[in-house]
Structures are given as C-alpha cells and as structure tokens.
C-alpha cells in the first residue's frame, strides 16, 4: 500500500467562530482517521522517535496497537511512561521532538504522533471505566511541591512503585501551569482534572492552598515524616523589560492575564475579575505564552490584537500550529519590532488615576537582524530613526518567567544559579540532602514535556535512594 506523503489534517473549529469562544480549537481525530494515520508509521527497528521524546513513550508500539484498533492496548503502552497522555497529545511541541526524528519525515511529512497520542487518551477517557490499581505501600513517604507537569509526573511514577505521595499546590486548583497558564481552547480544564483524578486513584494525595515557604517550609515537611522532597514549583515570577510606562494601569504580565482568565473566570459575561471590555491589545513576545495571551485577549472581546516581536517570523519560538491558528483568527504580527516605551495619560480628577495613569499606546522601534552569534542566531539590532507608535489600551508582557524565590529564601542549603533556578545534578538532586527538583524551577520557563522528563528522572533517583536507605 502506498504511503500517504502528508499527515492527516486535524479538524478544527472555523477561525471566525472559534475566535469568539473558549471551546477547544482542535477537535481531534476520528477513529477512522486515527487508524489511517497510524498506518503511515514505518515501525522502525531503531525507533528514533522514542529518543526524541523526553519521557521515552514507546511510540511505534502504541501506534501499532492503533493500527489494530486496539485503542485501550495503545493507552496501556503510553501509560507505562507517561502520566499525562491527554495533556501531552495537546500541548507538546512534537514537531521539534519526536516527530522531528521520524524516519518518514526524511522524505514525507512525519507521522502525526501527538495527534495519535491525543486520540488514544481521549478514547480511553471516553470509553474506559477501568480504575487504576494502587500499588502495595512500600513504607516510604515523599512530598511533592507543585502540581504542575513535573510534580504530577514525579508523583505518578512514585505512586506506581508503592510510595505514599502528597502533592502540595499553592493555588486552589491542582494542575499548575496546565490550568492557570494554558487557555481552555488549547487544553480544557476537564482534561487536566481527569489526569489528576487518575493520579489520585493511584493513591496520590493532593493538598491545595498550601504555599511551601509560607504555609509550610521544606524543613517542616521532613519533620512531618517525609523522607524526600521534590520541588516542582515552576517559574511563576514574570519578567518585564524595565522600560518607561510599565507601571501604567492596563499593563499585565502574561501570567497574571492568563491566570485571571483561567482560574478567576474573567471570561464570564459579568466577571468578578474583569480584564477588558473591547479595546486594542499589544502582546510583547513570540513564544507559546504570547500566542495564548493574544488569542485569549481576542476571545475576551478585544477589537484588535497585535503580537510585537523583535525577531522575524522564521525565528518565532512558538509552535507552528499556534502561530498559524493566531494568524487565521486575525491577530496581526508586528515582527522585527521592539517596544521602547508604554505611553499613557493621567487624569488628576479621576480617583482611580491618582498615581500612574492608563495605557494609551506603545512606542516601538524597528529592528533588523545583525550578524549571527556563537549559537548561529542573528541578533536583532535597532534601526535608527524608525520609531513608531501603536494605539492600544492593554499591553501584555510575555517575555519569559523566572523561578519564584520563595522556596530558595526559606530553605537552607539550597543552591541556585544567577537566574534563580535551583541547581541539580543529573539525577535531579539539589545541594540539600534528600531534596530533589525539576522542571521550570530548575530551567526557567520551558515545555510541559521537558518538565515531565525532569519529574521522571527525579522519581527514579528518589526510588533508588530510598530503596537503598
């Protein structure tokens, strides 16, 4: 049978329709399309796609089961290495990881690995009533700080080995960045909730509204009887550009903006935490978070949304699919531009405006790409005399985040780098005995799947340490 050179398209909501609602944009493969896509897999002996996956999902094996229409068997295979298959199938950058290694991709488009993983996970969630079996308790207790992808992965891997695991989450909903950072139209909250419930069925306890470093300290966790602690607290401290006008009303970090929308229900008709009513928005940055913020602003009623990015379209770090969706929805890209000032006005008679004033625009300068640096990336250079302004009412800074210093400042013996990331060895062990870390708390803002990979590594190290204790 001849191989289809292109991967099967993912059905989506029409752009003009989806830009006005928070329902999931990608609709998922049907059973028939999933089987046809699985038939494109060459089932390579050396399995290069597995090497490209940070959690080493047994990709050719689960795809072989999809070919046979044994979807539950496929799910069982994925679950041996991944605790969050429905999440990964939606938000992982497969094009730069597993799919970039696909042998079929040398000549044709690679197999739609992520789309097949999503299909399998969704099929299981819709059709299976199977309750995960708890492992026999092995007598050891481990605390997990943070319920994001690294924390949940570490918790799941340890629970399957019989550890009594308790996850501590600072916010009122478990899931970390999966629920407060990624919008509903890209990752429905019900999907994350289902994945968390699966972990609870394995025996994982989840305690919300507990801020480690405030409510409890790492030292107190050991006093409570935990023998190891994994820190997966993420990178929730937003970065700003330190340009004039950043204190104006209407300037948000992407973290605040997305958290208000996701967890504080700013998308309701009469929200308690409103963000905007119409107006124009500029989002500064070019990553996935910038795309999420821009597309969320559109759905919250913005009249016009700009992405302001200092490099070219070819260098946008966001997933290709997210950029394409943003363009289809009408978001305008101002590339090779960099903000130099946020403009505002002050009304002395308005009591709300007694200090800084409100945003009225953003002043930018055009950029051009200079000579490549040591990594081969061309550095953007300002073009003299090219300043221009955009009339906007809201500015969202999506230029990255850093690890929150709270845990560092309240935990003795914990070494961090100059950016605030916790320093760990290859097994995830920190400079503090029996304390491990992974994900964005170590690396700064990165991908969901890389954080999951770090959680797996730490779980393995914790297991080896406590078994030999």
Image (spheres, grey):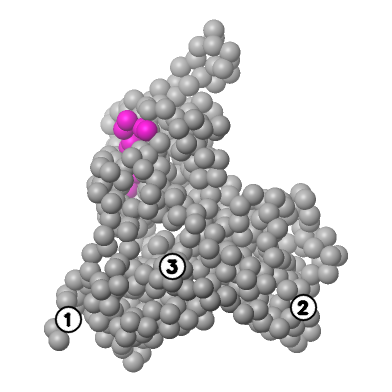
Cα separation, mark 2 vs mark 1, equals 51 Å
- Which residue was labeled with disc 2? 140
Residue shown at 32% from the left, 59% from the top = 27
Residues marked 2 and 1 touching at CB (< 8 Å): no
Of tags 1 and 3, which is closer to the observer? 3
According to the picture, the residue beneath numbered tag 1 turns out to be: 3
Above/below status of 56 relative to 259: below
Q: Which mark is residue 126?
A: 3
Q: Of circles 3 and 2, which is in front?
A: 3
Above or below, 338 against 125 in this view is above
Do tag 1 and tag 3 residues touch (Cβ < 8 Å)?
no
Q: Which of 291 and 269 is in front in this view?
A: 269
Secondary structure under tag 2 reads: loop
Residue 441, percent across and down?
60, 59
Which residue shows up at 49% across the image and 57% down it? 190
- Please give the name of the residue rendered at 45% of the width and 55% of the height, measured from the top-left corner: 188
The dot on residue 289 is none
Q: Which of the two discs, 2 and 1, labels the residue nearer the N terminus?
A: 1
Closer to the camera, 114 or 426?
114
Query: Is residue 304 on the magenta stretch?
Result: yes
The residue lying furthest to the bottom in this view is: 45
Residue 130 lies in the magenta-colored region:
no
The quarter of the rendered structure image containing the C terminus is: bottom right
Decide which of tag 3 and tag 2 comes sooner along the chain.
3
Q: What stretch is highlighted in magenta?
A: 301-311
């Amino acid at each position: 049978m001849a191989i289809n050179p292109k991967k099967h398209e993912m059905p989506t909501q029409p752009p003009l329709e989806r830009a006005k609602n928070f329902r999931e944009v990608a609709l998922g493969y049907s059973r028939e399309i999933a089987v046809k896509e699985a038939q494109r897999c060459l089932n390579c002996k050396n399995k290069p796609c597995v090497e490209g996956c940070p959690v080493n999902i047994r990709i050719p094996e689960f795809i072989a089961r999809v070919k046979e229409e044994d979807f539950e068997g496929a799910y069982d295979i994925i679950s041996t290495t991944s605790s969050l298959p429905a999440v990964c199938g939606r938000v992982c950058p497969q094009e730069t990881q597993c799919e970039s290694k696909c042998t079929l991709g040398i000549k044709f488009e690679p197999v739609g690995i992520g789309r097949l993983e999503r299909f399998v996970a969704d099929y299981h969630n819709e059709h299976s009533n199977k309750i995960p079996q708890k492992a026999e308790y092995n007598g050891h207790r481990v605390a997990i700080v943070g319920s994001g992808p690294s924390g949940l992965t570490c918790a799941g891997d340890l629970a399957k080995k019989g550890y009594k695991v308790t996850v501590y989450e600072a916010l009122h909903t478990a899931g970390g960045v999966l629920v407060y950072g990624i919008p509903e139209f890209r990752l429905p909250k019900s999907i994350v909730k289902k994945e968390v419930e699966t972990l609870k069925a394995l025996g994982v306890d989840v305690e919300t509204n507990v801020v480690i470093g405030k409510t409890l300290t790492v030292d107190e966790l050991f006093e409570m009887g935990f023998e190891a602690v994994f820190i997966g607290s993420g990178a929730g401290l937003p970065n700003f550009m330190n340009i004039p006008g950043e204190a104006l009303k209407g300037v948000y970090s992407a973290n605040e903006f997305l958290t208000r929308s996701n967890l504080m229900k700013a998308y309701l008709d009469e929200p308690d935490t409103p963000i905007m009513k119409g107006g124009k928005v500029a989002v500064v940055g070019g990553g996935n978070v910038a795309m999420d913020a821009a597309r969320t602003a559109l759905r919250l009623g913005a009249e016009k949304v700009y992405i302001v990015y200092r490099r070219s379209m070819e260098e946008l770090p966001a997933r290709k699919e997210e950029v394409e969706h943003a363009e289809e929805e009408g978001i305008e890209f101002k590339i090779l531009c960099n903000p130099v000032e946020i403009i505002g006005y002050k009304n002395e008679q308005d009591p709300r405006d007694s200090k800084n004033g409100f945003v009225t625009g953003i002043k930018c300068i055009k950029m051009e790409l200079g000579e490549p640096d040591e990594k081969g990336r061309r550095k953007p250079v300002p073009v003299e005399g090219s300043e221009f302004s955009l009339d906007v009412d809201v500015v969202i800074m999506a230029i990255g985040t850093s690890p929150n210093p709270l845990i560092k400042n309240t935990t003795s013996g914990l070494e961090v780098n100059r950016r605030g990331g916790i320093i760990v060895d290859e097994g995830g062990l920190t400079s503090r005995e029996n304390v491990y870390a992974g994900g964005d708390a170590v690396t700064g803002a990165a991908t969901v799947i890389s954080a999951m990979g770090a959680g797996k590594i730490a779980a393995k190290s914790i297991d080896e340490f406590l078994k030999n204790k």
